[in-house]
Amino acid sequence: MAAPESPDLFFDQLATATDAAPETAASRLKSRVYSALVQAAQQEAPLCTLSESKAAGRGLCVFEEIVRIAPVGEAPERVNWCRVCHARVLGERVENAPIYWAHCPYVRFQNR
């Protein structure tokens, strides 16, 4: 799949292709690939703020929502909070990890 012009479009196409693919990959592998893709995107350009993501219709996990509503300014809203979240650590290291929060990308990767 060729990389489209917009990173959002790329991730949307990747998610669509992933949804159509059979779930044969290990959930740990899916989590690691997702982490690597987000890290690469962050190195290319600043991430959208959490407020921009929510306004675009994306769901935020409970921790991202706390940062979004806190009076902390724009810089913390551009941080990839998944890098410090225990759900990412569990998702990358435990097959079928016991994580269940809403809008957490690592929950979607679990083979349940």
Image: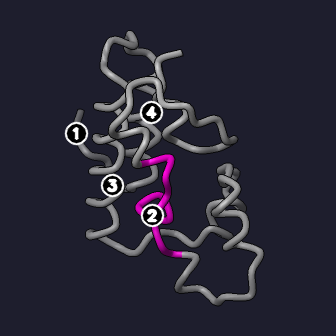
Considering only order in the chain, which callout, 4 or 3, is on the residue closer to the N terminus?
3
Q: Which range is magenta?
A: 78-88
**Residue drawn at (38%, 10%), measured in percent from left and top?**
22
Residue 15: name its quadrant.
top left
Front tag of 2 and 1:
2
Q: Residue under circle 2? A: 84
Residue at 55% from the left image edge and 81% from the top image edge? 76
Q: Which residue is mark 3?
A: 5
Q: Residues within 10 Å of mark 1 (few under 14, many from 20)?
A: few
Where residue 13 sits in the image (x, y, percent)? 41, 35
Residue furthest to the left in view is: 2
Separation of residues labelled 2 and 1 (CA atoms): 30 Å
**Label 4 residue SS:** helix
For the residues bearing labels 2 and 3, Cβ distance under 8 angstroms:
no
Q: Which residue is mark 1?
A: 2
How far apart, in angstroms, are the residues tagged by discs 3 and 4? Answer: 16 Å
* Residue at image location 48% in from the left, 73% down from the top: 79
Q: Is label 3 or label 4 in front? A: 4
Mark closer to the chain start, 1 or 4: 1
The residue drawn where x is 28% and y is 40% is 33
Residue 24, image quadrant: top left
Classed neighbour count for the residue bearing mark 2: other residues with Cα under 10 Å, few (<14), some (14–19), many (≥20) = few
Q: Is residue 62 left or right of residue 88?
A: right
Label 2 residue SS: helix
Dot 4 corresponds to which residue?
15
Q: State the mark number for residue 24.
A: none
State yes or no: discs 1 and 4 in contact (Cβ < 8 Å).
no
Numbered disc 1: secondary structure: loop
Of marks 1 and 4, the one in the foreground: 4
Looking at the picture, tell me which residue is in the foreground, 87 or 39: 87
